[in-house]
Structure formats: structure tokens, C-alpha cells
Image (tube, rainbow, N blue to C red):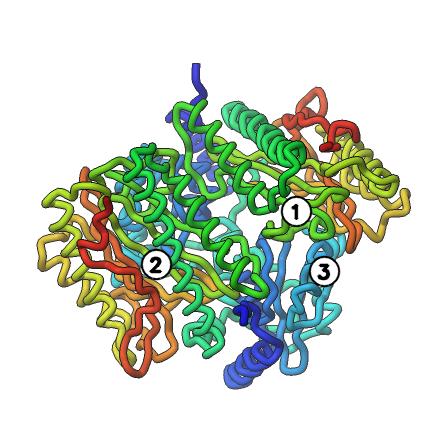
Amino acid sequence: MAFLQRLGPEFYDKVQRDIRARMAADGIDMLLLDAADDVLYTTGFAFRPNERPIALALTAQSAFLLIPELERDYALSQNAAADSVVYFEFPGVDRPFDVLARATGPIRGTIGHGFGMSVGRATELAATYPQARIVATGMVSTMRQIKYSEEVRLHREAARISDAMVASGVDLVTQAFRTGKPLPSEIELERHVVRHALDMMANEHEDVLHLATLAGGLINGGVKSAFPHGIESARRLEPNEIFILSLGCRVGGRASESERTFVLGEPSREHETYYRIAQEGQRIGTAGLIAGQTCASADIAALNYLHGAGMTPYVKHRVGHGMGVAFHESPWVEAGDQTVLQAGMVCSSEPGLYVPGVGGFRLADTVLVTQDGPESLTLYPRDFDAIVLG
Amino acid sequence: MSFTQRLGTDFYVRVHRDIRTRMAASGVDLLLLDSNDDVIYTTGFSHYTTERPVVFAITQDGAWLLIPKLEESHAAHQDIAAEPIVYFEFPGIDPAFAVLGRALPQANGTVGHSPAISAARIPQIQAAFPNARVVPSNIVQQMRLRKYPEEIVMHREASRISDEMVIAGVGLIREAMRSGGTLPSEIEIESFVSRHAMKIMFDEHDDQMLVQGLASGLVYSGPRSAYPHGMPTGHPVKRGESIILSLGCRVGGRAAESERTLFIGEPSKEQEGHYAVAYEAQRMATAALIAGHTCASADNLALQFIRDSGMEEYLLHRVGHGMGIMFHEAPWVEGGDQTILEPGMITSSEPAIFVHGFAGYRIADTVLITELGPDSMTHYPRRLADVVIA
């Protein structure tokens, strides 16, 4: 009854069939995807990206995976859903794109590539296929916004584990606090919760899909938590201050995050006031994730509430972002994104407050947009009483 | 007497001056750099990369850093060597590059950008500077090939700590073998050595530049080590197998790696035979990192030795790569890279053999090119007797 992380060949057949339908509609003869997340999405091949190009080249008839020699066995062992085309090295005596061009043959029509491809690589691509017109296309990014049911199942499991990571972090801190031991440092906490997630996967899942970031988090305590994206330090937590556990993982290469703000010991009146406003802002953010409405509308509703509550100096970012193969991907739950929300999208809801000298206040959930309204896949408690630890 | 990771203001003044000299020589009026590593190199600002643009902009008269609101306090805290320009969010009602275009003096001449910039950002730059010619420029890539003396101090310290990580990993395995308990898993070893490195930095350094990948490694044993870029797993290491500890860290944002292949118990004749070839190839490769010679020549020499030893089928990659802010950056110690080695360059030396289904054998050092020849900054011993854990 163990959980299966890896998606089967029929899933990738379906993905590639759906991409081909869009290619035909847009007049694209070959699509080249060189981002690690696109390669995972289309072939199931997970790898550690570096300067060596790894790309899926998809045409109406063929699917080639361009890889360096050092990934040949690794791609085979993962049953990558494309035929390997192997070059020896980067930059290479026999250049990677030249090796690919020999496999695909000349292309006379249109070659599309993702918007994330670097200008340098797009230039090489054009030189390799001199007869083709090269265009950037967002078709796969758009497809990735709406999850297949197989993917939703993975996001749901990732959400469950993200919640468990928060719970294990809370346990570690409260145990130390109650027994009078030194409180853990941010780095120790991070290691502990990551370890917990990896153990859960190792014990409960059949076939862990190893990625560079399988589980991770941002942990910031005290006044430093007022920097939304600080990197954790060896600083130990202290009683009576704020700390934020922002934790997430990827199951079968599908992301989730669960984030809560805690006070260890005695909260101040300020702590409670800011927390309750942040909590209400987040409730509004989540409630606004309604199929048929725009991403912008959810952001505006939550941020307007925070502005109305007099919090303008402490508002530093939008409500959230899409999640899928990557922790951050489109659509963006932000006033500048007019994407219409649709059932099957997965977004974070995480407006925050950052009060200099006091701390940061942020809750984040992973939310599935459904026909029946927003469904939070992360469920860790959030009432003020639940986040005061002692 | 403690070690300082942060480079001083005078360092960034010099970097900016040297960039401006090259801009004048190549006719670039405004240079835009949007990669995490170029931003560290030019401003000392370390951040967690997301989809939100963070862009360094420099002209003959000024230097700016475009950042999202949520990085504003973080940037101020890091005392960055550029004037901040703040936009609210991504994608934004007022998008990042539009804010940049208004804040900077309008460029009528040439705007350069790194070749690594994504295709999606080019139209945004063109729209922000409608009267300018927008071209790729590798000025800073070229500068980064040769390190400033202050950077070499960082790389040397990162090398020392990388060696300490190997020592800690070996110690952990040796302890477990002596006590007769179960041997640690790859994930446990990775976690242990990363923590060890961070502890050294926090105990012995006055300040830390917190970057993504502060300390980490690849740890793989037995047949899994034949996949050179596999991810660590929960498998415990086993007696009779070999293990690769490929460990590195960044000090002041400057990288080093130290890697050894170690035997868990006395090696067999077969293992010894494999190791001897990897050992000799790596010795030859390091010895060939000579100022005035090409990168290709060092690669060709070491790889030819492996082929001549009858191990061509086990050869999966080049000799090495440059190191700087990134663990992997130009130049590439590979047959296709005709870059001439110069004093002040830092590269890895790590030719290897991977025996499919059995084991991988790799030794990697961080090597500084000097007038007097290659100077390996990592020193962990490597003779067969030194790498047997019994």
C-alpha cells in the first residue's frame, strides 16, 4: 500500500500528446525545452542542473532527450520518456546542439523554445538550425498551470508532508523549551525538519524521486524574521520572540509549502495584534482563489485589507505564486497578473507583514483551485492559541 | 584575529572601476547583470533567487541595484555596493524593468546584458530603453575568470573547510565501524558534513556571507557512485564498497570543493586497479594546469591516459571546470575549451572513471593557477593507504 511517487509512461504519453496538439495549433515543428522543471514535467527525468545542456526536443513524430554522457545511465534508470541523444561533454569538441541536429535532421519550419532559455543558448540554437525560424513560446508553462489529476495527488501528499515538517519543527522547539535545554539554531531546525520529511518519504513511499531540493525551508527567528527571504543562520531561537517556519517539499517532483509564524513563550500585545491582522489577510487571500476570477483580484482583496488596517509600511510582497514542478511558477497571485484562475491550478496564499524590530508575520498554504472553491491542501492549525508555544 | 568573509567597499570600487574600463573599451554605455552570481560579484548582495528580477546596472557615472520591495531591508542590511532601485512585485502593475527604465538616465547608446539572461527579459529591456541598442556582453564573465587577491583568500579558506568536511565525513564512518553499529546513510553523512562546515564558519569567522549552497555535497556509495550526479539516498554505506565524498562550500560567496573516493574496509585487487588509474589521471590533470597552456590540453592529456589504460568505457566526463562565485563556471577544463590558462584562474581537477553497476572513482581538488605552476588548495591525502577506512 506504499505511495508511488513516480508517474508512469501513460502519463508522459498524455503530456506529450497534449503538447503536440498545441504545437500543431501554433505551427511549431519542433519544441526545445531546456529548463530542468520542463524536462521533469515532460519526461520524468530528474537531475541536478548545471552548465551542461539537458533538453527535450519534441516533434510530431519523435521525442529526443539531449543529455551529456555522465547522465546516460541515470536517464535510463529513471525510464525517461524520450530517446536519449548523448553528447560527451560541455562545451565539447562535438557541441551538444550539433549532436542533437544530427538526430533530428534539419528543421525547415519553426522551432519553439521556452522563455527561460538564455539568449546565449538561443543564439546557438539558431546557428545550429539555420533554416528554421526560432521563436520563444510559453505553451508548456501555460499547460503546467492546470494540473492533471495524477499531479494533484502528488501535491496533496507533498502538502501532508509539509504540514508534518512544521509539526516536527514545533516538537523540537517545544521539547527543548520545556526541558530547559538550549533552543535549536535556525540551521539545526532546518536540518531536523528536512530529515523528518526525507524519513517520511523513505518509510512511506515506494520510489522517491530524488531532486536537488526534495525538502527544504526558510527558518528565521527574532527581528531577522522581518527580512522575508533571509537565509538561515546559526543563531539560536530565543524565548518570547517570533519565529517563522516556512517549509516545503516535492513529492514525485510536485511542490507544496506550509508556513506558520510562532511565538515561543509569552507573546506581547504587539505580537498578537500583528498576527491577527496577518491571519485575516491570509484568510482573505485564500478565499479569493476562485475559479473564474483573476489572480489579481485575490491579491488586491488581501492587500487592500492590510492597507486598510494601517499596515502599509509592513507590506512587502504579493499574496502568492503558482506551484507545480517548481516551488514558484506561474500564475502569480499578484495585481499585475490578469490570469483567470481555473480548477486544477495550485497556488500559495501567503500575504505577510514585516515589522522592523518586531519580526515577520506570515502564514502560507498550498491551495488547490476547484470548481467548488479554494481547497487548502495544507491544514496545520493557525489560530493564535495554536501558534503560541510553551 | 578572526576571519572576515565580507569583502570591503574598496573591493567593489575596484570591481566597478575595472568593469567601466572594459565598458568604455567595448562601447557599452549601460551594463545590466541579472544573475545571482554576477550580483554577488558586483555588489556583495546575496539573495535567494526567485522569479523576481534582481539586476545590477552600471554606467560610467553610477551603479544601481534593482530589487523587489521584499529585499529592500535585506539589501540595506548587507551594505551593498550600489544604489537601490525598488519595485514592488513580480510581475507587477509597474513591472521591474519599467521602474528601472525610469530611474536610470535614458541610454541612447548601447545597453549590454549578460548572455545568460533569459529570452523573456530582452523585450522588457528593449521597452525600458527604447532608444538603445541591446546587445549581449561577456565583459564580466571574462573578468571573473581571473580572481582578485581578496577572492583568492576566500577560495583558500573555502578549500580548507572543504577538506575539513571530508575529514568529518571519514571520521563519522570510522566511528561507526569501530563501534560496530550500523553505518550512516548517504543522507546522514551529507547532513553531518554540511553542519560541520557551517559550524566552522560560525565559530571561526566574524561574519558569514549566507548564500544558497553555503556548504553541501554529493555522497554516494557502492553501485550508486557510478552515477556521477546522483542524489544522496537513505542507503547505508556498506563494508567492501567504496564511497565518494564530494564536498564543498562557499566562503564570502567563493567556492571550493574537495572530493575523495574512500574504501570501507580493505579494497579488493579490482578496486585497487580502478583507483590507481583515477589517481594517476588526476595527478596528471592537476600538473597540466599551467599558465600559458590551454584548458583543452589538460583535459586531453588526462583523458588520453585513461583511454590508454583500457578504461575508455568508464569515462563519462571532462577533467574539470572553473570555480569562482559558482561551483561551476568558465573556463571549462575540457577538450572543446581553447581558453588559455592564466595566473589567478581557479579550476577543479577531477577526471574520473565510473564502472557501471559497480562503483565510481573520482578525486577532485580546487587548483589555483599561478606563475609558478598549479597550486592545489585542497590537501586531503589521496594515496591508497590514506583512503582506506578500516
Circle 1 is placed at which residue position?
B220
Viewer-side residue, B285 vs B337:
B285
Q: Nearer the viewer, mark 1 or mark 3?
A: 1
Residue A220: quarter of image: top left
On screen, residue B48 above or below B3: below
Circle 3 is placed at which residue position?
A72
Q: Is residue B338 visible?
A: no
Q: Amino acid at mark 3?
A: Arg
Residue A205 in the figure: left or right of residue B307: left
Residue A287: quarter of image: bottom left
Residue A357 in the figure: left or right of residue A51: left
Which quadrant is home to the N terminus of chain B?
A: top left
Viewer-side residue, B370 vs B115:
B370
Element under label 1?
A: strand
Q: Amino acid at mark 1?
A: Tyr
Circle 2 is placed at which residue position?
A258
Q: Amino acid at mark 2?
A: Ser
